[in-house]
Amino acid sequence: MSTTNYTTIRNAILNKQQVVAIYQGHIREMCPHVIGLKNGKEQALFYQFGGTSSSGQITPGSPKNWRCIPVDGLSNISTRPGLWHSGNNHSVQQTCVDEVDVEVSA
């Protein structure tokens, strides 16, 4: 667990920073909640609050804005301070990451 993308996202979780990145050709504005491994691969759970998505329009506050994304699939990653976004269903057991490294504090 040492890629630059991984470290950037991990630090964003620890500091509750927003992440802006490109995934599958879409610019996404997201708040990372969990990072670790899934079947031995680096993966993270994000709440997307802005940008675009292949699964449709982003509706602010929607429980459908959760994104499970392989870390190596992200490009042009940057972090920034800003309002923290999360779905009201964050307490639901996540299945995106099976070996959790860092999870956002409440």
Image (cartoon, rainbow, N blue to C red):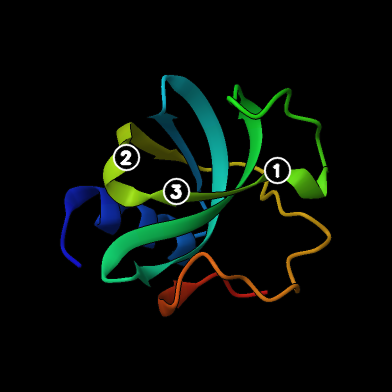
- Label 1 and label 2: CA atoms lie apart by 18 Å
Q: In the rendered image, which residue does mark 3 sit on?
A: 69
- Label 2 and label 3: CA atoms lie apart by 7 Å
Q: Of the residues shown, which amino acid type is indicated by label 3?
A: Ile
Q: Secondary structure at mark 2?
A: helix
Q: Could you tell me residue 78's position as x and y percent? A: 36, 36
Q: Secondary structure at mark 1?
A: helix
Residue name at image x 48 percent, y 22 percent: 27
Q: Is residue 85 left or right of residue 76?
A: right
Q: Of the residues shown, which amino acid type is indicated by label 1?
A: Asn
The image quarter containing residue 61 is top right
Q: Of the residues shown, which amino acid type is indicated by label 2?
A: Gly
Mark 1 crowdedness (10 Å alpha carbons): few <14, some 14-19, many ≥20: many
Q: Which of the two labelled residues, at mark 1 and mark 2, occupies the earlier sequence position?
A: 1
**Residue 27 vertical placement versus 9 (above, below):** above
Q: In the rendered image, which residue does mark 2 sit on?
A: 73
Which is more toward the observer, 55 or 27? 55
Q: Could you tell me residue 62's position as x and y percent? A: 82, 43
Q: Could you tell me residue 29's position as x and y percent? A: 55, 33
Given contact means CB atoms under 8 Å apart, are the residues at marks 2 and 3 in contact?
yes
Q: In the rendered image, which residue does mark 1 sit on?
A: 65
